[in-house]
Amino acid sequence: MSRRLLTLVLPAAAVLCPCLVPSSATRAQQSRAAQNQNAAPAALWNTPSIAPKQARPSSGPAPRRDISGIWDAFAAGIQPTGVKSHAPFTEWGEKMANTYKPGDGPRKVSLGLINDPLDGCDPAGFPRNLFFELRPFRIAQTPDQILMLYEYQKVWRAIWTDGRELPKDPEPRWYGYSVGHWQDDYTFVVNTVGLDERTWLDNAGDPHSADMRVEEIYHRVDEDTLELTVKIDDPKAYKEPWLGLNKFILRRQPASFDIREMICAPSEAEEYKKTVAEPATR
């Protein structure tokens, strides 16, 4: 059992259709799914999330204003395992960081001393779900929202595209409040505020304040390639804005890709604490 105590079990109901009007990319996905109908039934369930994927044929051009589909970080051979580097802490940021006892990074502590909220099954929150354990996720587009459906902790985010402004004094949320717009036909930009200060930015225990603003840029390079850039702007915790991910490559998967269920169960977290973490402190 991993320290994160997230169990892979049988998948639940089918996931939402990626878009309302089939694009050329969606039709291509449907065609590939039809080709998979002759596959062995077991092969269609619980697609491995952290495993090299088979090479794909050369992709076609990117569809306009469409980032829908199932996207996988590991298909490009790399998965985010935390923030590689960040701007210097402010005095407040350093004080907060010193209260966190992570299991990784420069302030790593022994197993029994870790106080990572994930180990107690708190939500990973945003943007930690992008910086750590970014497993396959589905993007679904509707007329007024883009929905992000994540494998990790089986959670979803709504990004509003109806022109509303971000709230001025938001009640904190684990995944914040997000609005997005098309910068051009192939670049979708998202801004998020109102993030709960209890969440960590990554498994190395990097903090953030409630004032943090996160910008995501999704650039559709071609039919099967999406670049993700994530910018952190938190003047209370960091002396300057910095990039957590910079043009990180995501690969689109066939429509038949079955996203596994990956949920933190409190009962398993308690069992792990008793059998692994507590004995490690003796």
Image: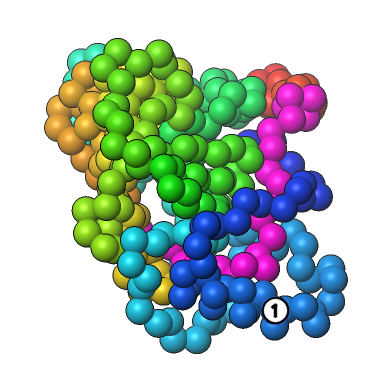
Magenta stretch: residue 265 in it? yes
Q: Position of residue 4 (x, y in %)?
A: 63, 36
Q: Identify which residue is drawn at 39% across, 61% down.
A: 66
Residue 53 location, x and y as percent? 58, 72
Residue 278 in view of the camera:
yes
Residue 191, located in which quarter of the rendered image?
top left
SS of the residue at dot 1?
Answer: helix
Tell whether position 154 is magenta.
no
Q: Report if residue 102 is visible in the image.
A: no
Residue at image x 62%, y 51%?
Answer: 16
Task: Identify the image quadrant of residue 44.
Answer: bottom right
Give x and y (percent) for residue 128. 44, 36
Side of 264 where 111 appears, left or right: left
Q: Residues within 10 Å of mark 1 (few under 14, many from 20)?
A: few
Residue range in magenta is: 248-269
Residue at the spot of label 1: 34
| Residue projecting furthest to the bottom | 57
Q: What residue is shown at x 65% (from left), y 65% (from top)?
A: 257
How many numbered discs, if any?
A: 1
From the viewer's perspective, is 36 left or right of 165?
A: right
Measured as percent of width and height from the top left, residue 39 is found at 79, 79
Q: Nearer the viewer, residue 207 or 31?
A: 31
Task: State whether residue 144 is above or below residue 117.
Answer: below
